[in-house]
Amino acid sequence: MQNFWPTSGFSALQRNERGWLLPTDDYLRLFLARPELAPVPESCPTELALHAALVQSPSLPVTPAGLQALQDADARESYQLFLHFRDGLLAAGTLEAYYLSLFPRDGTGRVTIAPLFIDLLTQAITHNLLADSADAYEVRAGEMLFRPQRISTQDGQVLSGDQVVIDLLNETGGLGDFGRFLAEAKAPLHTVHLQVLTDDNVPDYWQQADRYRFLLDLTHEVSNDLSHGLVLTMTRARSGLKALAGVLQKWVRHFLGVSVTIRPLQKIDDDAWRWHVGLDVEATALLNDLYEGRDVAAARLQRLVSLFRLDFADAQEMRADVAGKPVYLGLMMNAEGVLRLKAQNLLVNLPLRALM
């Protein structure tokens, strides 16, 4: 098993017989070491004592009065958010069960934990899915489930890059606070080049401590019309879209126990279109409008990164009214070029025969 995302906490977790992840004290200690909770020189004695006690026993009960004793309001809020997350996770028993409880299929759920915790849960679960993978493209595509991406077009390629990394490079040249100082002083910044993941630099990807600097090519296959009704499809040997589809297949199987195939699609040409799922907020709204026959501006359509077709291996696992029909998926960036994939949409909105 590869520990390609050390910050995911996967190495501190254990699997049950189903392959779902059991929370451990060491996993909870990782949260206590994060900057949101780690003590600072200004921390009051009560905060220092609470932190030390939780490091010693991460499941230690903490009363509301104990939290109110913390002098710093930000510290109180951070601990309150962590304890709410911790208690829900321990009550659920596994990371996957807790994740599902946050997004119930009956639509009654309301997320009550901070988005950061959802991203960290998703990262650990995705790491679990890919722990045995030796496919760098699949691992890079897995990052899209828990880290927002910036989408750009370069020489006909659609490239996905980590938003945090790209924004930091644009702001500081990759030099952190020192780079920010140079930028404010209008001094030249050292240029850090991002790499598009290719077969040639796959070894570099595995060796890099910061793999988030690699771009993923999300360009579609190219089809050439040969006339006479013949179409030649030029397959991209290493397609980021294909890798992402593979990750999403594993995601559905892991949580819902159903086998599906997902493949990239350039357009929906289906008079019997019955079901769709947006993989993000923007795609959900766009697919709804297209399905209802509403006019969609060309500029908005251009922000669609890809469509996918999902098919159930066993049509009997689908709702009877759509059994055997494909499910269309959409992936879309917002007006600022940012893509925030919400993999939970697949778990909530697939047309399953019964609630799982």
Image (tube, rainbow, N blue to C red):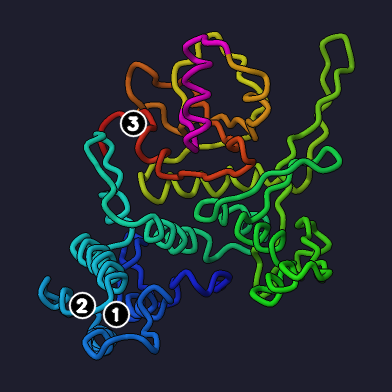
- Residue drawn at (85%, 18%) of the image: 225
Question: Alpha carbon of mark 2 to alpha carbon of mark 3: how far?
Answer: 36 Å
Q: Which quadrant of the figure has residue 19?
A: bottom left
Could you tell me which secondary element the residue under label 1 belongs to? helix
- Residue drawn at (60%, 38%) of the image: 333
Asked if residue 288 lies in the magenta stretch, the reply is: yes
Q: Is residue 72 left or right of residue 219?
A: left
Could you tell me which secondary element the residue under label 2 belongs to? loop
In front: label 1 or label 3: 1
Question: Alpha carbon of mark 1 to alpha carbon of mark 3: how far?
Answer: 36 Å
279 or 81, nearer to the observer: 81
N-terminal of the pair, mark 2 or mark 3, is 2
Residue 59 numbered mark, or none? 2
Task: Determine whether label 1 and label 2 are within 8 Å by CB.
Answer: yes
Question: Alpha carbon of mark 1 to alpha carbon of mark 2: how far?
Answer: 7 Å
Q: Which quadrant of the figure has residue 77?
A: bottom left
Q: Which quadrant of the figure has residue 172?
A: bottom right
The segment highlighted magenta reads 277-295
216 or 166, nearer to the observer: 166
Circle 2: is it few (<14), some (14-19), or many (20+) Cα within 10 Å?
some
- In the picture of the structure, the residue carrying the numbered disc 3 is 352
- Identify whether 322 is placed above or below 71: above
